[in-house]
Image (cartoon, helix red, strand yellow):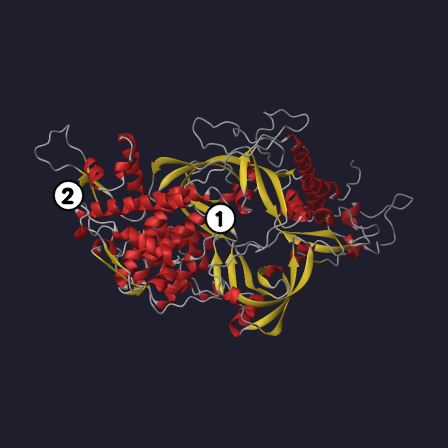
């Protein structure tokens, strides 16, 4: 957790928010506006600018703050008829009525889903925007709304490309980036971004590829450069729907089946996604079980097998004695050279030629991945990690805007609830009584230019009840900005994908949110089209059982797979709510074994039974936000190194710090030959070392990040799963564990190969 701001930082934020509020009141005060010099003289706080350049920078930042909160600061010509052209300077104002919230009203059901959607973001910046949007919509929400506590979707974005792409979508600006498709082919793309959305736990960009002159969809995790936003603008198609685009991305059934031998008592996560194999052709040796894995391609199968490390291997050849015509290439000849008179008694059990080819292809892919993982890890001793000062980008901007947004929200709220109790109001805003009093004191010293007693905001709270006056312009509901509406809409889009949700209510709420921003095309770009009820997502039998347990106050006994320890445990849980995040469902509840709140991923629940009446746990009742992160401190801290294709790890695992590093080339290679990420055929990606004259800036080739993991096995599994893209530098015990894991993970030997 980040340390709280000290007294000096709080004073600085308060002073900045006070200056911004006085500036806003001045810009609202006069239709003819003020010049910069006039504003410098009448707005308290600008006198602290040491010189003209400092004032200019401060004024530009302040204008940006106000615009980001929904107040359109206009620049108009000077109307002084006696001034010469050289003396004319622009004037600034916020036109009255230009910022008012359009007429919109949300039903109780719509208000409930808005509250859930605003609470969905795990990303701090988007969470701030979504909550600010909900605050602005407060006057339009139904007082009867009671959001259910048994469902909470979460939106987590681990892709650095998300923020610039979303901004480009909203601004209708063309972008460029480097992209690697699922086959490993590299290309530079120029795209008109039409929409961004999530599906099956991944984030996608849809738009027009100007080079290929066709509509394309891109997975954000495969963008391996910075996103370059150009000045070229475009108009997206009127009939485009990002939701509809995502809805058409139907999950394809597996195309291949491969038999894997898994060590008995181990490989639980692999067993969970596989089925027992009864094929006699690939019977497991002693100490192993045979399972059948259904996958889309050989690389997917190899990834799952490599993640299991030494506990899984792919057999190449059928067991002796079970070889049919397909395996032998024909009937066995007799001593005289003719065909055998006796039929092969085992031919019915013999595998087909394509089955043998599949086993060999997956085994080859596993062997190649493990070689790449060992080779990359062998280069880690030469990595020198030097942590620099870690900067918190945008922290001051965010805190100043947050404080000003809260001051304005307090004015709107109290104007609508004159005489509200101070303690109740503080709870409503999630702050202490002392913080609320400080905010009221700030409001008390702000007002129209001149700052005489009758020009200041009238604030009183002496008897424990709050009254505000002389701030009519600030009390009017404010329209949503496009980024605020987008954050709320994307939370609603996630809610729309939750099984058992009411898509009709969500779509209606999305239309009204877009109306509140005066940007109806936003809803068209995110909302899925109307579909038959039979096509909407449905709960599995397990999730339905868990929902019933929450509704009826029942305890459940779970058989739960702990992937990081590779074991199945028994838990007694009093479930409280369901969480939907990145395409996965979780149940949040009180675990009696841990005597603490815990979150369980539903696809890792092996069994679920009723265990009697649940108890009420005060700590669970007091939870405001649901979390899918473990409450306890993770015991393994490691420094990992990733290349450009593994950069998502920095965000996904919430790295404490990260820094660009250099990785020495592999033996026999030069830095130039190893300057780029590798494709499947080990050819370097062209043009990735230096920025082209016209193209996006490459990301740092290698980044070191300090990351927490639940166990050493979980860290080792990450290295083999993403073979050749992740290595471990420290601590020594983690490096030793990873190297032992790699050396123990030996693929099935290939006949006739070294």
Is 354 on the left-hand or right-hand side of 234? right
- Identity of the residue drawn at 36% across and 64% down: 424
Which x, y percent locates residue 120? 45, 56
Disc 2: CA contacts within 10 A as few (<14), some (14-19) or many (>=20): some
Q: From the viewer's perspective, is residue 585 above or below residue 313?
A: below
- Identity of the residue drawn at 34% across and 68% down: 143
Nearest to N terminus: mark 1 or mark 2: 2
The residue at the far front in this view is: 462
Q: Tag 1, which secondary structure?
A: loop
Q: From the viewer's perspective, is residue 155 above or below residue 693?
A: below
Q: Which of 595 and 689 is in front in this view?
A: 595
- Identity of the residue drawn at 16% across and 46% down: 30
Q: How many labels does the image show?
A: 2
Q: Nearer the viewer, residue 502 or 642?
A: 642
Residue 193 visible within the image: no
Is 339 on the left-hand or right-hand side of 507? right
- Identity of the residue drawn at 54% across and 46% down: 654
Quarter of the rendering occupied by the C terminus: top right
Is 616 on the left-hand or right-hand side of 456? right
Which x, y percent locates residue 385? 59, 33
Q: Quadrant of residue 273?
A: bottom right
Is 240 on the left-hand or right-hand side of 321? left
The residue at the far left in this view is: 82
Q: Name the residue under label 1.
A: 157
Q: Name the residue under label 2.
A: 32
The label shown at residue 189 is: none
Disc 1: CA contacts within 10 A as few (<14), some (14-19) or many (>=20): many
Q: From the viewer's perspective, is residue 39 above or below residue 323?
A: above
């Amino acid at each position: 957790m980040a340390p709280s701001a000290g007294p000096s930082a709080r004073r600085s934020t308060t002073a900045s928010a006070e200056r911004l509020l006085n500036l806003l009141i001045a810009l609202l005060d006069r239709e003819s506006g003020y010049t910069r010099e006039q504003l410098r003289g009448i707005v308290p706080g600008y006198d602290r600018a040491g010189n003209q350049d400092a004032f200019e920078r401060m004024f530009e930042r302040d204008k940006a703050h106000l615009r980001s909160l929904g107040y359109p600061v206009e620049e108009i010509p000077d109307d002084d008829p006696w001034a010469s052209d050289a003396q004319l300077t622009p004037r600034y104002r916020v036109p009255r009525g230009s910022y008012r919230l359009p007429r919109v009203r949300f039903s109780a059901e719509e208000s409930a889903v808005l509250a859930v959607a605003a609470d969905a973001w795990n990303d701090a910046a988007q969470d701030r925007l979504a909550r600010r949007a909900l605050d602005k919509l407060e006057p339009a929400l139904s007082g009867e709304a009671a959001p259910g506590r048994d469902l909470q979707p979460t939106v987590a974005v681990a892709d650095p490309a998300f923020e610039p792409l979303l901004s480009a979508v909203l601004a209708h600006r063309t972008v460029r980036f480097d992209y690697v498709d699922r086959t490993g082919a590299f290309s530079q793309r120029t795209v008109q971004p039409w929409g961004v959305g999530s599906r099956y736990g991944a984030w996608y960009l849809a738009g027009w590829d100007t080079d290929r002159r066709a509509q394309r969809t891109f997975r954000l995790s495969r963008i391996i450069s910075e996103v370059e936003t150009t000045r070229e603008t475009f108009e997206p198609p009127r009939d485009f729907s990002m939701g509809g685009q995502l809805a058409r991305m139907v999950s394809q059934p597996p195309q291949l089946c491969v038999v894997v031998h898994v060590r008995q008592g181990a490989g639980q996560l692999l067993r969970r996604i596989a089925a027992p194999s009864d094929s006699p052709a690939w019977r497991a040796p002693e100490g192993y079980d045979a399972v059948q894995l259904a996958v889309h391609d050989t690389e997917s199968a190899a990834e799952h097998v490599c993640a299991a490390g030494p506990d899984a291997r792919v057999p190449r050849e059928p067991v002796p004695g079970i070889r049919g015509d397909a395996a032998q290439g024909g009937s066995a000849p007799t001593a005289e050279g003719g065909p055998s008179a006796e039929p092969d008694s085992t031919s019915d059990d013999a595998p087909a030629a394509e089955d043998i080819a599949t086993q060999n292809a997956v085994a080859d892919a596993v062997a190649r991945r493990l070689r790449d993982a060992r080779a990359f890890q062998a280069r880690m001793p030469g990595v020198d990690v030097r942590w620099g000062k870690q900067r918190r980008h945008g922290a001051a901007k965010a805190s100043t805007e947050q404080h000003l947004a809260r001051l304005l929200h307090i004015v709107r709220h109290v104007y609508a609830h004159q005489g509200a109790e101070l303690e109740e109001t503080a709870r409503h805003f999630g702050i202490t009584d002392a913080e609320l009093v400080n905010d009221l004191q700030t409001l008390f010293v702000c007002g129209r230019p001149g700052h005489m007693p009758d020009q200041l905001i009238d604030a009183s709270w002496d008897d424990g009840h709050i009254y505000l006056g002389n701030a009519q312009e600030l009390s009017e509901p404010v329209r949503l900005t496009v980024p605020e509406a987008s954050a709320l809409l994307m939370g609603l889009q996630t809610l729309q994908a939750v099984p058992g949700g009411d898509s009709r209510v969500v779509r209606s709420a999305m239309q009204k949110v877009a109306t509140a921003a005066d940007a109806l095309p936003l809803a068209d770009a995110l909302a899925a089209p109307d579909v038959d009820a039979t096509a909407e997502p449905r709960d599995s039998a397990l999730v339905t059982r868990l929902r019933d347990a929450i509704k009826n106050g029942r305890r459940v006994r779970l058989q739960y797979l702990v992937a990081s320890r590779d074991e199945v445990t028994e838990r007694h849980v009093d479930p409280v709510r369901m969480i939907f995040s990145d395409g996965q469902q979780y149940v949040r509840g009180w675990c009696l074994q841990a005597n603490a709140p815990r979150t369980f991923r539903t696809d890792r629940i092996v069994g679920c039974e009723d265990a009697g009446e649940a108890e009420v746990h005060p700590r669970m009742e007091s939870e405001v936000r649901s979390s899918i992160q473990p409450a306890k401190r993770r015991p393994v801290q490691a420094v990992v190194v990733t290349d450009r294709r593994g950069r998502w790890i920095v965000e996904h695992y919430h790295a404490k710090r990260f820094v660009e590093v250099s990785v020495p080339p592999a033996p026999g290679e030069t830095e130039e030959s190893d300057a780029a990420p590798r494709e499947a055929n080990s050819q370097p990606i062209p043009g990735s070392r230096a920025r082209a004259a016209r193209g996006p800036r490459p990301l740092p080739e290698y980044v070191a990040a300090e990351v927490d993991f639940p166990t050493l096995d979980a860290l080792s599994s990450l290295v083999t799963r993403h073979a050749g893209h992740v290595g471990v530098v420290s601590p020594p015990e983690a490096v030793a564990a990873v190297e032992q894991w790699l050396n123990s993970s030996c693929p099935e030997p290939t006949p006739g190969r070294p």
